[in-house]
Image: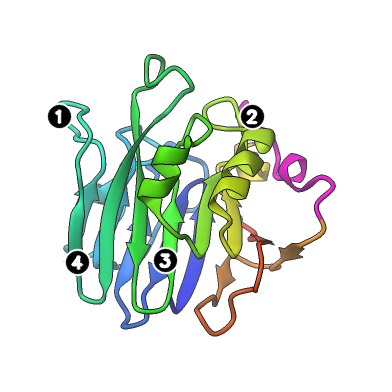
Amino acid sequence: MQSLRWFGHSTFLITSDQGLRILTDPFGKDVPYPGIDVTVDVVTVSHQHFDHNAAEVVKGNPVVLEGVARKHSDFVKVDQTLKDTYFRTVKTFHDPERGAKRGLNAVFVMADAGTTVCHLGDLGHILDEETAREMGPVDVLLIPVGGYYTIGPAEAWGVVNRLKPRAVIPMHYKTPAVATWPIGPVEEFLKGKDKVRRVGGSELSLGKENLPESTEVFVLEPPARS
């Protein structure tokens, strides 16, 4: 991975070693972050909710990889390589009741020659050993931490401890842009933790050459509305 840029919520622009531009879970216009004004090659969609599936806002003619089908809400097994990046999905759920409340959720595992990035989407439960094994080794973990709709801080640390990624980037938490949403702030996830690096912006260069030796949290700043 060359770089990673956070647009807010669960939307990241990931640039692979060979320059493949991947956008994760794009949010629609009803989400009060600044608009997504980028041209990309690939869009990943973890599930079909308006704040995660707005592929139409993206410029260009990207390949759209849906982990949950738009029409029938079925899990989609993605298993393909685009340019230098291998994409695959792992079936999970949006709630702790195996999808009874909010349906399915797809974890996206994306690996180029140097780094494996895992985007958890709206994961709503602790990962069991079998699911973690299916996901495999992870270098960079993009994880929801705000609770209410997804796992909260305690559950998120349970996932981190099971997967043991080298870099953890929290997402899907309360910020000034979504101050009225019933999710918690990132500080609840960070409380009492030592290995935390506040990046001071929305972009981060993180590849195999500069990954930490052991798990470290990187906190990005979402862009503010002008």
Q: Which residue is mark 1?
A: 71
Q: Amino acid at mark 3?
A: Thr
Q: Earlier in the sequence, mark 3 or mark 1?
A: 1
Magenta-drawn stretch, dominant element (helix, strand or loop): loop
Answer whether labels 4 and 2 touch (C-beta < 8 Å). no
Residue 157 spot, x, y in % from top left: 65, 43
Q: CA distance from mark 2 to mark 1?
A: 30 Å
Earlier sequence position, callout 4 versus callout 2: 4
Q: Nearer the viewer, residue 56 or 159?
A: 159
Q: Which numbered disc, 3 or 4, marks the residue that appears first in the sequence?
A: 4
Q: Which residues are magenta?
A: 179-193
Q: Is residue 222 above or below residue 151?
A: below
Residue for badge 2:
180
Q: Earlier in the sequence, mark 4 or mark 1?
A: 1
Left or right position of 135 against 82: right
Near mark 1 (Cα within 10 A), the count class, few <14, some 14-19 or many ≥20, is few
Circles 4 and 1, Cβ within 8 Å, touching? The answer is no
Q: Find out whether residue 192 is within the magenta segment.
A: yes
Mark 3 in CB contact with mark 4 (< 8 angstroms) = no
Q: Secondary structure at mark 2?
A: loop
- Mark 4: which secondary structure? strand
Write down the residue under mark 4: 81
Quadrant where the image shows the C terminus: bottom right
| Residue situated in front as seen by the camera: 49 or 159 | 159
